[in-house]
Amino acid sequence: MLIAQGLTNAEIAAKLFISIPTVNTHRKSLLEKFDAKNTATLISKAIRQGLA
Protein backbone atom coordinates (compact mmCIF):
# COMPACT_ATOMS: atom_id res chain seq x y z
CA MET A 1 0.00 0.00 0.00
CA LEU A 2 1.67 3.18 -1.18
CA ILE A 3 -0.15 5.23 1.44
CA ALA A 4 1.59 3.23 4.17
CA GLN A 5 4.95 4.15 2.64
CA GLY A 6 4.22 7.78 3.46
CA LEU A 7 3.89 8.94 -0.14
CA THR A 8 1.87 12.05 -0.90
CA ASN A 9 -1.07 11.92 -3.27
CA ALA A 10 1.07 13.60 -5.93
CA GLU A 11 3.84 11.01 -5.50
CA ILE A 12 1.36 8.14 -5.67
CA ALA A 13 -0.21 9.63 -8.80
CA ALA A 14 3.18 9.93 -10.49
CA LYS A 15 4.17 6.38 -9.55
CA LEU A 16 0.92 4.91 -10.89
CA PHE A 17 0.61 7.27 -13.89
CA ILE A 18 -2.82 8.49 -12.75
CA SER A 19 -4.16 11.91 -11.80
CA ILE A 20 -4.10 13.34 -8.29
CA PRO A 21 -7.93 13.55 -8.18
CA THR A 22 -8.02 9.81 -8.96
CA VAL A 23 -5.72 9.12 -6.02
CA ASN A 24 -7.95 11.28 -3.82
CA THR A 25 -11.01 9.29 -4.91
CA HIS A 26 -9.32 5.96 -4.19
CA ARG A 27 -8.11 7.18 -0.80
CA LYS A 28 -11.63 8.31 0.13
CA SER A 29 -13.02 4.94 -1.00
CA LEU A 30 -10.50 3.10 1.15
CA LEU A 31 -11.35 5.26 4.16
CA GLU A 32 -15.03 4.43 3.70
CA LYS A 33 -14.48 0.70 3.11
CA PHE A 34 -12.30 0.37 6.20
CA ASP A 35 -14.55 2.69 8.22
CA ALA A 36 -11.50 4.80 9.04
CA LYS A 37 -11.62 8.47 9.98
CA ASN A 38 -8.06 9.23 8.87
CA THR A 39 -5.10 7.73 7.05
CA ALA A 40 -3.37 6.55 10.23
CA THR A 41 -6.43 4.51 11.20
CA LEU A 42 -6.71 3.20 7.64
CA ILE A 43 -3.13 1.94 7.70
CA SER A 44 -3.57 0.41 11.15
CA LYS A 45 -6.69 -1.50 10.07
CA ALA A 46 -5.05 -2.65 6.83
CA ILE A 47 -2.03 -3.97 8.74
CA ARG A 48 -4.27 -5.85 11.19
CA GLN A 49 -6.01 -7.48 8.24
CA GLY A 50 -2.69 -8.37 6.61
CA LEU A 51 -3.17 -6.03 3.66
CA ALA A 52 -0.21 -3.74 4.20
Image (spheres, rainbow, N blue to C red):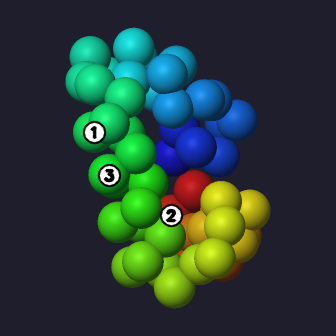
- Give the answer, above or below, for where 11 lies relative to 33: above
Name the quadrant containing residue 49: bottom right
Give the label on residue 33, or none: none
Label 2: which residue? 51
Q: CA distance from mark 1 to mark 2?
A: 21 Å
Instruction: Look at the picture and state if 29 lies above or below 3.
Output: below
Tag 3, which secondary structure?
helix
Which of discs 3 and 2 lies nearer the camera? The answer is 3
Q: Are marks 3 and 2 in contact (CB under 8 Å)?
A: no
Residue 27 visible in the current orientation: yes
Drawn side of residue 23 relative to residue 35, left or right:
left
Label 1 residue SS: helix
Density class for disc 2 (Cα within 10 Å; few <14, some 14-19, many ≥20) is few
In this figure, which residue is indicated by the disc labeled 1?
22
Of label 3 and label 2, which has the lower sequence position? 3
Residue marked by disc 3: 25
